[in-house]
Image: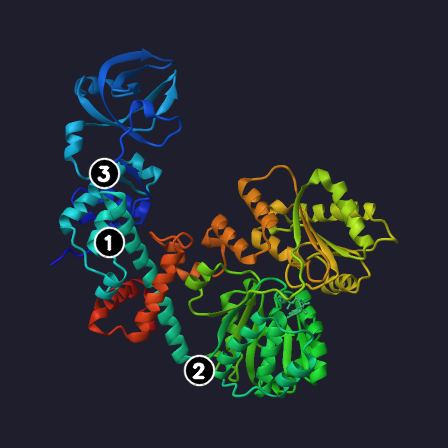
Amino acid sequence: MSVNLQTPIDYLKGVGPNRAELLRKELGIHTYQDLINLFPNRYLDRTTYYKINQLQQNSAEVQVIGQIIKFEEVAQKRGKRLVATFQDDTGTMELVWFRGHKWIRENLKRNTPYVVFGKTNWFNGKFSMPHPDMELLKDHEKSLQSAMQPIYPSTEKLTNKGISNRVLIKIIQQLFTETKGQFTETLSPELLENLHLVSKSQALFNVHFPQNQELLTKAQYRLKFEELFYIQLQLILKNLIHKSKIKGLPFHHVGDYFNTFFNTHLPFELTQAQKRVLKEIRTDLGSQAQMNRLLQGDVGSGKTIVAFMSMLMALDNGFQACLMAPTEILSVQHYNGLIEWCNKLNISIKILTGSSNTSERKEIHENLENGQLQILIGTHALLEDTVKFKNLGLAIIDEQHRFGVAQRSKLWHKGPNQNPEKALAQNAVPPHILIMTATPIPRTLAMSVYGDLDISLIDELPPGRQAIKTVHRYDKNRLKVFRFIRDEIEKGRQIYVVYPLIQESEKMDYKDLMDGYASIERDFPKPKYQISIVHGKMKAADKDYEMQRFVKGETQIMVATTVIEVGVNVPNASVMVIESAERFGLSQLHQLRGRVGRGAEQSYCILMTSHKLSNDSKTRLETMVRTNDGFEIAEVDLKLRGPGDIMGTQQSGVLNLKIADLIKDNDILKSARYYAKQILNNDPSLSSPSNKAILNTYRQMAKYRNIWNYIS
Ligand code: ADP
Ligand code: MG
C-alpha cells in the first residue's frame, strides 16, 4: 500500500536527524505530510529565454542561452573577481564570480552552449549576472523538471545551515520517489467531476514541479478548493450541531407592543433593508431554534430601531429583553432614545452601568427577578452574576467588536435557567442573541469566520442623507481649517475634534489633547464659543455632563479622545476633525466619521496629519477620502492588516491557510461553501459511499484538531 504520510520526516532518505531537527524548528515540518504541504511561494519561469539585446534593467531573474568566449580576472578593492564574457547572436554580457574562481575556470567550458540563469545588473555600460545558475544546454534540454522552478518558503537559519532551496527541491523529489507520487484522494468523485478538478496526486506533483503555467493553475485551484472546502465543512457541521442541540424560546406571535408601535409610533418609514432584516429576525424568533444573528449595518444605517422592534417581539411573548453597549455614554444614549418609545407603549425600562448606585441596583435586581422590569439597557454591568432575569428572551449586543466571545457566551446563561452548569445540564433554553456591529466584517471573512452565526445586513442608509465630504489636510493648514470651523458654527452647526489616545503613549497623548484644547480655546474664545471636553480620565458624571451640554447644543465644539467613537448621535454636528489621523486604524476612522452626517446638513470629515506618512497611512487616508462605503473600507483594512488583527479571526483557523488567500480566492471560497452545504444537506452524516473520501479526510483532520467530538 501507499506510504504512511504520518511518518516522521527523519525517515526520508537524505534528511537525517540534523536536517529533521532544522525542518521541525524552522518550518514546522514534522511528517511526510507536512513536507508535501510545504507549497512553493513562487516559481521561476524557466520556460522563457531572453536574447542579450532584450535584457532590461531591473528585471526579475532571466535565462539566456549563449557561450563563454573568454575569462578574465579583474582586481578590485578586496581580492579579485572573475569575469566571463558571454555571447549570443545579439550581443555580449558578463558573468561574474567573487569566489570559487579555480573551480569555475577548470570546470566551465568555453565556446560551448550554456543556459545561464539569474538576476542581471547594469554595470559599466553592460549587463552582468553575478553567480549565475549554469547548465549545459544539452543537459538542460534533457532535464524535464526545471520548467518552472519552485521557490520554497525558507528562513535564514535554514539557508545558513545548508538547507537551500535546491536541497528542499531534492528532498521533496525524494518524497515523490518514495511515495511513487501516489497520494490518497481526499475529495469525492462527484466533486472532482463537477468541478473538473485534477486528482490529489496530480495536484501535488504539479504544485511542486509544474511543467507549465496551465498545469500549475489547475493544481493550485484544486488545492485551494480543498483547503477552503474543509474549513467550510467544519463550520457548517458545527453550526448544524449547534442548531439541532440548542433549542430556542418560541416567540409564537407578533403582539400588541409590536403592532401598536408599528402602526402608531413609528417615527419614520423603515427602509427596505430594515424591513428585510426585521423579517429575518422574526423568522428566527418564531422557529424552534435559538437565534444567533449578526446584524451588520454601516454607521447611521438605523440598527437601533431594528433592535428595539426585536425587543418588542420578545415582550409580546412575555419575555424580557436586554441591550448591552460597550460604553457608558452609549448605554445612556440608547436609554434616552428608547425611553421615549417605551413610555408611549407603557413598557418599563431601566439602565444599569458602573455608576448606578446601590439603591438603583437593588431596585433593578428585584424588578428583574420578579419580572416587572421588561427592558434593561447597560454596559458590562449586565454580565455581573448578581444580575438575574426572570425570563430573558432576547439579548442584544451593540458594537460587538468591543466585547469578546467569552462575554457573548456569558449572556447565554442568563436565560430562564440561571445557573450556567445547571442550565447546560438540563438543556435549558438560552435567550436569543442578536449582535449588532457597524464595523463591517468583510464578506469574505464573515463567511469563513462566522460560519456559526447567521448574518443580516442593512445595506441602505435612510433617505435624505448626504455623503460626507472627506478631506486630508496637513497641520500647517490649521488656520484654514479653523476658519472653516468658524463658518460652520456661524451656520449653527456643531464640531467634533478628536485626538488619538493609545495606552502606550498615554502621557503624550493627554498632553496633545490638552494642548489642542488650549489652542482651540484661544481661537474660539468664551463667551461666544463654548467648548466641551471628554476623555477617559474624567469621572463618569463629568463626562456625562460635558456630553449632555454638547447634545443639548449648549457647546459648539466637542474636544475628545476616541471615547466618542461609537454610537454617539448628535444630528446637528456637521464637522469631524480628526487630529493625527495617521495614527488611527481605518475602521476607527470610519467609525469616527460616522458621528457626523446624521442630520440633513452637508457634513465634513477633516483628517489632519503631519507630513511624515508611512505608505500604509497614505493608503488609509486616501481610502477615507475616496469612499464612504464601510464594506469597501473593511476590505482595504483587511488587505493592509491581514486577517490576524480583525476580530474573531484568531479562533477560527483561517489564519493558517497554506495555499488559499481569503481575499484573492474569494470565488473559490464561495464555491467551496456552496458545495460543502450541498453535500451536508444531502448527506448530513457523510455516510454515503460516494462521500467516503470526504468523511475519512475530515475524520483525520478532526483527530488532528480534536474536534471530532462535535459530530460523534
Ligand atoms: P446605527 O445603525 O449607527 O446605530 P442609528 O440606529 O443610531 O444608526 O440611526 C441613525 C439615525 O438615523 C438616528 O437618528 C435614527 O433615528 C435615524 N433613522 C434610522 N432609521 C431611519 C429611517 N428608516 N428613516 C429615517 N431616519 C432613520
Ligand atoms: Mg448604533
Name the spot of residue 13 as percent of width and height, x first. Answer: 16, 44
Q: Which residue is mark 3?
A: 147
Q: Nearer the viewer, residue 525 or 380?
A: 525
Disc 2 is placed on an element classified as loop
Q: Which residue is mark 1?
A: 33
Q: Residue furthest left?
A: 1
CB of mark 3 near ligand 1 (< 8 Å): no
Q: Nearer the viewer, residue 634 or 184?
A: 634
Name the spot of residue 84 as percent of width and height, x first. Answer: 26, 17
User: Which corner quadrant holds the C terminus?
Assistant: bottom left
Q: Is residue 628 left or right of residue 55?
A: right
Question: Which amino acid type is marked by label 3?
Answer: Ala
CB of mark 1 near ligand 1 (< 8 Å): no
Mark 3 or mark 2: whose residue is earlier in sequence: 3
Report the mark closest to the observer, 3 or 2. Answer: 3
Above/below status of 329 relative to 521: below
For the point 54% across and 40% down, the residue is 615
Instruction: Tell me if mark 1 has few (under 14), some (14-19) or many (20+) residues whose alpha carbon lies within 10 angstroms of its own.
Output: some
In the drawing, what numbered circle is on residue 404? none
Disc 3 is placed on an element classified as loop
